[in-house]
Image (cartoon, rainbow, N blue to C red):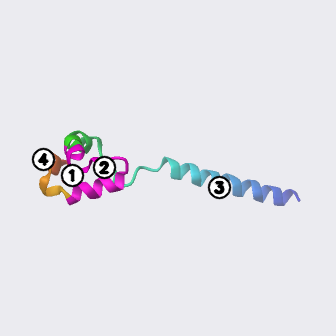
Amino acid sequence: MGIRVNRVLIAFVVLFGLALTASLAPEPAAAQTAAQKRACGSDAKKFCRSSMGDQQQLMACMKQNSSKLSARCRKAMAS
């Protein structure tokens, strides 16, 4: 019975470690950088206000409206 408890404990520790690692992982590449937020804030409000609550929708909207974005925002989105 002692070996079974050790295995369960080890499995729990491994799963906890994996969950902790996943929670500390960097945000996906699609996430906006601080520079993009500064450069594109007014464009996002102007063209994609309804998408601002959802990061993926916002990025899709910004790409869809890329021809309308300010030069500063287009430059930030390209980097």
28 sits left or right of 43 in the view: right
Q: Secondary structure at mark 1?
A: helix
On the image, the x and y values in percent for residue 17 come to 61, 51
Q: Label 2, on which residue?
A: 50
From the image, state whether disc 1 or disc 2 is nearer to you.
Answer: 2
Q: Which mark is residue 14?
A: 3
User: Front-most of 53 and 35?
Assistant: 53
The residues tagged by marks 3 and 1 sit, at their Cα atoms, a distance apart of: 38 Å
Q: Earlier in the sequence, mark 2 or mark 3?
A: 3
The Cα–Cα distance between marks 4 and 1, rounded to whole angstroms, is 11 Å
Q: Position of residue 51 (x, y in %)?
A: 32, 51
Q: Amino acid at mark 4?
A: Ser
Helix, strand or loop at label 4? It is loop
Q: Position of residue 25 (x, y in %)?
A: 46, 50
- Mark nearest the camera among 3 and 1 is 1
Amino acid of disc 2 = Ser
Q: Do we see residue 9 in this rendering?
A: yes
Main secondary-structure element of the magenta-colored stretch: helix
Please report the bounds of the magenta region as a residue range. 43-64
* Magenta span contains residue 42: no
Picture quarter with the N terminus:
bottom right
Residue at 21% of width from left, 50% of height from top? 47
Disc 1 residue type? Answer: Met
Name the mark nearer the viewer: 4 or 1.
4
Q: Secondary structure at mark 3?
A: helix
Real-space Cα distance between discs 2 and 3?
A: 41 Å
- Count neighbours of disc 1 (C-alpha within 10 A) and say few if under 14, some if 14 to 19, many if 20 or more: many
Residue 44 higher or lower than 3, as above or below: above
Task: Identify residue type, mark 3.
Answer: Val
Asked if residue 7 is positioned above or below residue 35 in the image, the reply reads: below
Residue annotated with mark 4? 70
